[in-house]
Amino acid sequence: MANIDRDAKQKGTKAQNIATVLSIIPGLGQIYNRRYLKGIILFVIAVSFLITFWNFIDIGLWGIFTLGTIPREHHSIQLLIQGLMALIVLSFGLAIYAYNFIDARKDAKARAIGKPNPTIGQAVRDFYNNGFPYFLILPGLLMLLFIVVLPLIFMVALAFTDYNQYNAPPRNLLSWVGVQNFIDLVQIDIWKDTFFSVFTWTIVWTVLATTFQIVLGLILALFVNDKRIKFKRTIRTVLILPWAVPAFVSILIFSALFNPTFGAINRDILSQFDIMIPWLSDPFWAKVALIMIQTWLGFPFIFALFTGVLQSVPQDMYEAADVDGGTRWQKFRHITLPHLLFATAPLLIMQYAGNFNNFNIIYLFNEGNPAVRGQNAGGTDILISWVYKLTFETNNYNMAAAITIIMGVIVMAFAFFQFRKTSSFKEEGRY
Amino acid sequence: MALQRKTKSKIEVTFMYIFIILMFIVIGYPLVWTLMMSINPGTNMLVTKLIPDNPTLEHYIWLFTDPASDYLLWYKNSLIIAVLNSIGSVVITSLIAYAFSRYKFFGRKYGLYMFLLLQMFPALMGMVALYILLTTIGLVDSIWGLLLIYLGGQIPFNAWLVKGYYDTIPRELDEAAKIDGAGHMKIFISIMLPLAKPILAVVALFNFMSPFMDFLLPRIVLTDPNNYTLALGLYSFINDQFSTNFTRFAAGSILIAVPIALVFLALQRYLIGGLTAGATKG
């Protein structure tokens, strides 16, 4: 009995291996399994894939390595994009190819243990059942790949080329220059100075603006949640207003309010005390104004979030603290604050990441100005608005891309913290 | 002692009210100022007053009736993008989130990681490539190209949001339906969708509103003033000669800020609920 079992197993393994090896030509393994229709379909798919995409992939891969060889005729940027697309198409092709192996192997095994081949109707049903989640995500996945992922990879690729205003297709060919752009960024004076001043301001900006938002939101949430405060609904509605007004409108309004010639802040308020502050032309005051504006724009979200969470803090914890004679500060420090921060940590991290990349406020308030001598970024430019200027105003694509990669690394650090804090992943064990 | 505590409590409450009233002023001042600017006659900012001597609606009338005003055209463009973006994003994300919430498949976990990561990368990082891509398929300077970018770009955040909500719908429901012989699509349409209505409404609304509020993408993609969205159009009022058109800008802003703010205030508690359910659930 055991012998026969082993025999069957051996035969099964052998059949599996044959089916797998035959699958080097797509479909052949399935024909060996006597699943003719499936084999033919796989074969037809493979052949039409090759016929349709062979040229595209061939040129694409050639293009991505060489970036073209004849100036004016070969457009390096188009070749680069085609190359990236070719890689995506190729990986889809390889996925189907891999499926062809795995499937042949699986069916061979099923045959070896004596399962009858399914009828066509059943096979179609199986395919539908197993493939269903893939059908669901396919449209979205394709959009995501071409609209979000491809551009990001393209940007990464640009950082390793010499694509700038003076060296641009179709007039010139681009070439791969390795990490030269990153070396320039820390070695050539103008880039080095600009990079370090913009980088430090970006960090200061991210930390200060976001922390102020959070602290103000927290204080207000605690105040409004206090039992002794009345008109809670009205107060909450008003406090959320800055979030409800479209941000670009508010920023442009503030930009006008801070305008030194006609803005109300200098003209109507500060003039009472005989103060005139150069809000837009002095880098320091522009930065102060930006942080204040962002606090105004951002605290309502934190306020609303904390208000929601505050109501879920279990009351018996406070009662227990009362019994133990805990002071109010102790209750806040050891019950309320940990609860708030724990429940909202991922969203707070997102707030920091959001301000790190907050292009809108910098650009709309003052376009990153005032200009600073010896730098090619404005005094209030953060990394992302500097990248925007480098890309769309001075066409320093390669440097813009290099800086983008540095930003990407920092953003990934934020994301890493978020992964660890997001508990949605913890219940993945259910599958 | 008791009296002392009462006085202390009173001082605290007064302090809190003062702080809140202070915040009211800080919040209200820019908004009221804008409203007042919009009813100031003329376009010269240097002579505007917080409380104008002769309040007028001329700027509002100008926006709608003057032949030089493209306001209605921009409104139409924004509305087209908003409606299609709203419908499209609900369809795409509800399907993706269903797969991620209920099925086990190859790449599932990495897909979730990818969504979390991608939602932190701003669109600007891929802007050059997007611009070149749209040029190659002939959709640059067209609202359809913009719509396509919106639809793709919203996936990571919303799929995550909706998946978090689906996860809270008891699995027993679809298992029972499966036993009764319901197919994949049937379960999705007759069980998941009705139960997920609140979060889908939020997705629909926020994707409806975002084209009205977004500035950066239209700025890069659209160049012809006939294709402008509202945000871009309003910016063009003040971009060139800041002080000369601000009163018109103020009027135009009020007209989009008011409806958006109203809708937003009505719905914000759903958003908070959705965010905390999807992202924290701790």
Image (cartoon, coloured by chain):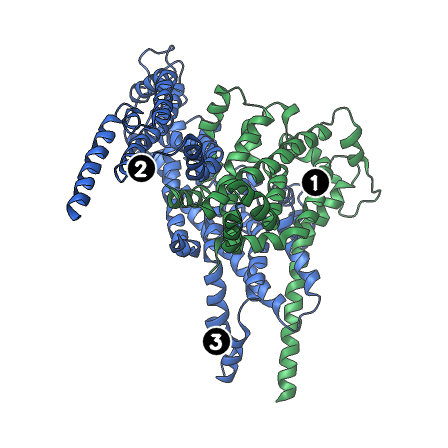
CA–CA distance in space, label 1 to label 3 = 46 Å
Q: Quadrant of residue A65?
A: top left
Which element is circle 1 on?
A: helix
Q: Which residue is mark 3?
A: A330
For image coordinates 52% across by 82% down, the residue present is A322
Q: Amino acid at mark 1?
A: Ile
Q: Which residue is mark 2?
A: A186
Which color is chain B depicted in? green
Tell whether A411 sits left or right of B230.
left
Q: Amino acid at mark 3?
A: Gln
CA–CA distance in space, label 1 to label 2 = 45 Å
* Mark 3 belongs to chain: A
Q: Quadrant of residue A390?
A: top left
Q: Position of residue A349 (x, y in %)?
A: 45, 53
Q: Residues within 10 Å of mark 1 (few under 14, many from 20)?
A: some
Which color is chain A depicted in? blue
* Mark 2 belongs to chain: A
Q: Which residue is mark 1?
A: B256
In the image, residue A221 sits, relative to residue A322, either above or below, namely: above
For image coordinates 65% across by 81% down, the residue present is B7
Task: Kindly indicate whether the residue at mark 3 contacts the one at mark 1 (C-beta within 8 angstroms).
Answer: no
